[in-house]
Amino acid sequence: MSRERIVTGKPVTEEEEAFSWSLRPKTLDEYIGQSAVVKKLAISLESAKKRGEPQEHMLLYGPPGLGKTTLAHIVSKEMNARLITASGPTLNRIADLMGILTNLDKGDVFFIDEIHRLPTNVEEFIYPAMEDFRVDFVVDKGPFSKVINVPLKRFTLIGASTRVGLLSAPLRDRFGISYHLDFYPPEDMFKIVVRSAEILGVNIDKEGGQIIAGCSRGTPRIANRLLRRSRDYALVKADSHITAEVAKKSLEMEGIDNRGLDDLDRKFLRIITDYYQGGPVGIEAIAATLAEETSTLEELVEPYLLKIGFLTRTKRGRSVTHETYKHLGLPFNGSVQESLFD
Ligand code: ADE
């Protein structure tokens, strides 16, 4: 089942992509947050420029909406090169990949989103391209088949993944650099909301900004989406000014609570509290009850619930916490606490 969610980190429509595009930082200087990654990347880029060589291959991983694609754009811009983008699941023909790789110039950035979903044969085809900047292309089948060795220009591969655990070790090992992007703390989220509001020419006061930042699950893409909803609400109902009241009302209309949880999050948690006494329960059982894919829950629902301590994960399954009961306004039956110490 697919649901429309406003608080997912995944891009929802092309229009939204275009909108968030205008808000994305174009340089590392403009980038707010992820300071450990930004510092390391700045040094690595400067070193590459000084050496006159392309940036090393880079793996970026973490939940959706935190800036992996943005960083790939910034790298290509800093290197004065082109960015060519593809996505793991759609890159399923060797011929397509061959076409892309042989057209890359020195320093170009080839960005593969959801790289953990590359088909195995395509993944193996990429290994020599990454390591030795060549591809071995087999032509013909049977007794007349031969391997043509095609040299490539020295490009940079940037792989992005929301599920780094699913990446094969040989692929992971071929990235010289690997950066983890984590959810942004509230101070950074607030700065991002204020910056986006400025770019959009939206009037927002401090409290309004804090409310939107606090409900954005540490994810800039969600913050920008919520800002847009609040802007619409303000335009229609409140003199185009986003106050605390306006922010609260517009989030309420979207079904988002004060921790940024939506209906799907709350249903997920309620299954554990109401049917499984707080857990532990396997993710498959929760997914079946919700009629959702386990991968959707693992990628889009669980990471933030884990982050804010509303969910714990052990070998025996998922459990909720005392905090979850409090948030949902449910009486705490006392048995969950034990499962936290498994
Ligand atoms: N917009 C989206 N992500 C951002 C970030 N990390 N810094 C500044 N603006 C952003």
Image: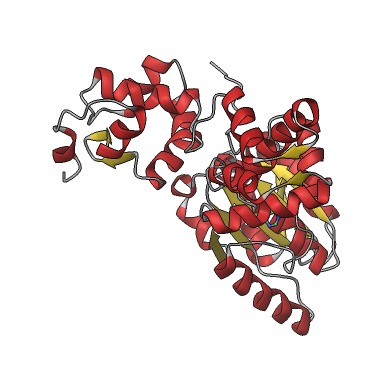
Residue 149 visible in the current orientation? no
Position of residue 33 measured from the top left corner of the image (x, y, whole percent): 60, 62
Position of residue 242 measured from the top left corner of the image (x, y, whole percent): 71, 40
- Left/right placement of residue 213 relative to residue 230 reads left
Position of residue 16 measured from the top left corner of the image (x, y, whole percent): 76, 34
Q: Work out whether 78 lies above or below 213.
A: below
Quadrant for residue 135, please give it. Answer: bottom right
Residue 339 visible in the current orientation? yes
Residue at image position (52%, 52%) is 183
- Left/right placement of residue 342 relative to residue 55 reads left
Q: What is the tally of numbered marks visible in this picture?
A: 0
Quadrant for residue 235, please give it. Answer: top right
Q: Work out whether 218 lies above or below 273.
A: below
- Left/right placement of residue 257 relative to residue 141 reads left
Color scheme of the displayed model: secondary structure
Closer to the camera, 253 or 106?
Answer: 253
Residue at image position (75%, 71%) is 54
Tell me the quadrant of ligand 1. bottom right
For the view shown, which residue lies furthest in the bottom direction?
50
Closer to the camera, 300 or 208?
Answer: 208
Residue at image position (76%, 43%) is 20
Position of residue 202 measured from the top left corner of the image (x, y, whole percent): 80, 44
Quadrant for residue 266, please give it. Answer: top left
Closer to the camera, 188 or 183?
Answer: 188
- Left/right placement of residue 324 relative to residue 5 reads left
Image quarter (top left, top right, bottom left or bottom right) of the C terminus: top left
